[in-house]
Amino acid sequence: METRLVKIERDAPDRETVARAGQILRDGGLVAFPTETVYGLGGDALNPDSSRKIYAAKGRPSDNPLIVHICRWEDIFRIADPVPEAAYQLAEAFWPGPLTMILAKKDCVPRETTGGLDTVAIRFPSDPIALALIEAAGGFVAAPSANASGRPSPTLAQYVLEDLDGRIDMILDGGEVGIGLESTIVDLTGERPTILRPGYVTKEMLEAVLKQVDVDRTILDGNCRLRPKAPGMRYRHYAPKGELTVIEGSPERVMAAVSQKAGAARAQGARVGIIATDETAARYRAQGIADSVKSVGSRADEEAVGRSLYRILREFDDEDVTEIYSESFSRSGFGQAIMNRLLKAAGHRVEQV
Ligand code: AMP
Ligand code: MG
């Protein structure tokens, strides 16, 4: 299969391009498209064959359910029942946007899409390209991140092409995404709303709307014996080719420990990478302790860090570093999402200093 890469403007998506992409989805094909979080790999969510194709293209285990993307709030009633009061409140506050809700599914949603579950994950994204495509496709687009399973989620169309060239029909290239980490997932089917995956919409933001929100304990705790409730969080999502270690503590101590460990590893012949910040990158470079020092952005700007993290991990893979040392970030607010992805990439190898 030939994969067509088509450029498209975010602010004024070309109607003909959107119509063509929508028709591919209606015909059971696959189209990757930008959202405000990461690029998604879209298929018709109500067509079991489309969902099977998504799993095959990504090499994703078929018990790992897909998020169904909608482009109108009221479409939630066509695929979920009941829709609890909390869903109305969260939608009012955060939709369209980077929040996914888990609700009980209606029969029209095939089990192929939900990984065999009776529940369905639903998101109403805000990206204009995504919205136009979902509408053109008939309103319900299943879209996991558009990476090959085991790679970081793509923040650029070029990364989708690297992973999925020849396996999907089309890629809509709308440039770099805004957030760079996947959506927050909140389960509304239990006694209390529970965050299954942290994202741009934080626990604090959710608690400003709903009184109390639980957090699945497995999100930041590598030793936790519990099973994560989101099936996808059970998989060792992505492991860089090099061994990644996260160093956690006050910024000065972290910098000293990263320098010391990187220098020692390099002296032993390792090819060393450092995930630094704008505040520290030049100092590591001056020390000559690493083969590659990359800044994820300013420590003061968590949004920049979130946007750069996956790109930097991909770049290290291309450079064949064998050991990577990373600075750490706050475990609260948006930092919780950043640390969740970083610790997962590190297989929870974290050292406190
Ligand atoms: P991705 O599409 O790559 O962002 O991954 C989707 C995430 O949503 C995975 O971690 C899934 O396990 C999770 N998810 C999707 N549907 C459900 C559901 N019905 N219940 C719990 N988790 C879900
Ligand atoms: Mg994914």
Image (spheres, rainbow, N blue to C red):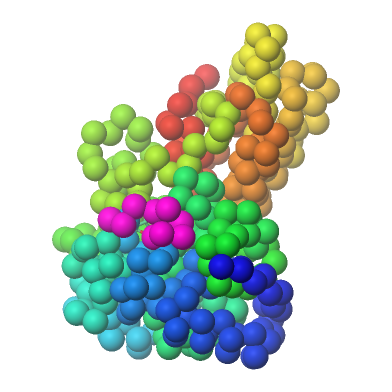
Q: Is residue 230 left or right of residue 135?
A: left
- Residue 177 in magenta stretch: no
Looking at the image, how many numbered discs can be counted on the residues? 0
Q: Residue furthest left?
A: 191
Residue 312 in picture, x, y percent from top left: 65, 43
Res. 327 visible in picture:
yes
User: Foreground residue, 87 or 39?
Assistant: 39
When asked about the image quadrant of residue 273, the answer is top right
When asked about the image quadrant of residue 55, the answer is bottom left
Residue 177 in picture, x, y percent from top left: 63, 63
Res. 71 visible in picture:
no
Which residue is at a point 24% across and 42% down the rendered structure image?
227
Instruction: Establish if 49 lies above or below 201.
Output: below
Specify the segment rendered in magenta. 55-63
Q: Is residue 296 left or right of residue 248?
A: right
Q: Quarter holding the N terminus?
A: bottom right
- Residue 61 in magenta stretch: yes
User: Foreground residue, 3 or 78?
Assistant: 3
Which residue is at a point 49% across and 66% down the rendered structure image?
41
Which residue is at a point 26% across and 77% down the rendered structure image?
109
